[in-house]
């Protein structure tokens, strides 16, 4: 029978997912200014982020890369030194109330 995760474990997993998602979104934007970076990623590679400012996430993702490599998968690690604070790039935003 499968064991149930505690709320604390679920929260930790969600936080790791959220952080990796943010790094993924930011990495999707990175090639816009650095087009050659995508050429360094082999086709069908699994990409893992190693954020140096977050040792816990770095360690967790590093463990995952080792597991994937042992299983014969192609893995690329993206070491991230720093993540700038988020800011909106939206301009001329207007909210328009919609009524039914």
Image (cartoon, helix red, strand yellow):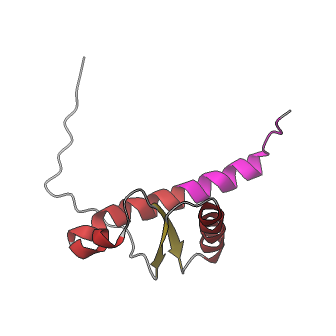
Q: Residue at x 65, y 53 (%)?
A: 13
When the figure is inspected, residue 8 is found, relative to residue 65, above or below; the finding is: above
Residue nearest the viewer, comparing 14 with 1:
1
Q: Residue at x 30, y 68 (%)?
A: 38
- The answer, for residue 34, to whether it is visible in the render is no
Residue nearest the viewer, comparing 64 with 7:
64
Q: State the residue lying farthest toward the left.
A: 92
When the figure is inspected, residue 21 is found, relative to residue 42, above or below; the finding is: above
Looking at the figure, which quarter contains the N terminus?
Answer: top right
Q: State the residue lying farthest toward the right.
A: 1
Looking at the figure, which quarter contains the C terminus?
Answer: top left
- The answer, for residue 63, to whether it is visible in the render is yes
Is 88 displayed left or right of 92 in the figure? right
Residue nearest the viewer, comparing 100 with 57:
57
Is 33 displayed left or right of 45 in the figure? left
Q: For residue 45, which quarter of the picture? A: bottom left
Q: Give coordinates of residue 99: x percent, y percent.
A: 23, 22
Q: Give coordinates of residue 84: x percent, y percent.
A: 38, 76
Q: Residue at x 36, y 65 (%)?
A: 26
Q: Give coordinates of residue 70: x percent, y percent.
A: 65, 64
Q: Residue at x 21, y 68 (%)?
A: 32
Q: Which residues are magenta?
A: 2-17
Q: State the residue lying farthest toward the top.
A: 100
Q: State the residue lying farthest toward the front.
A: 72
Q: Give coordinates of residue 34: x percent, y percent.
A: 24, 75
When the figure is inspected, residue 3 is found, relative to residue 55, above or below; the finding is: above
Q: For residue 15, which quarter of the picture? A: bottom right
Say if the magenta span includes residue 4: yes
Say if the magenta span includes residue 98: no
């Amino acid at each position: 029978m499968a064991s149930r995760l505690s709320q604390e474990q679920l929260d930790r997993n969600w936080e790791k997912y959220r952080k990796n998602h943010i790094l993924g979104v930011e990495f999707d934007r990175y090639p816009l200014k650095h087009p050659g970076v995508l050429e360094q990623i082999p086709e069908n590679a699994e990409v893992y982020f190693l954020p140096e400012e977050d040792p816990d996430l770095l360690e967790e993702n590093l463990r995952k890369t080792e597991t994937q490599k042992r299983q014969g998968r192609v893995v690329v690690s993206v070491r991230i030194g720093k993540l700038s604070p988020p800011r909106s790039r939206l301009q001329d935003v207007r909210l328009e109330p919609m009524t039914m």
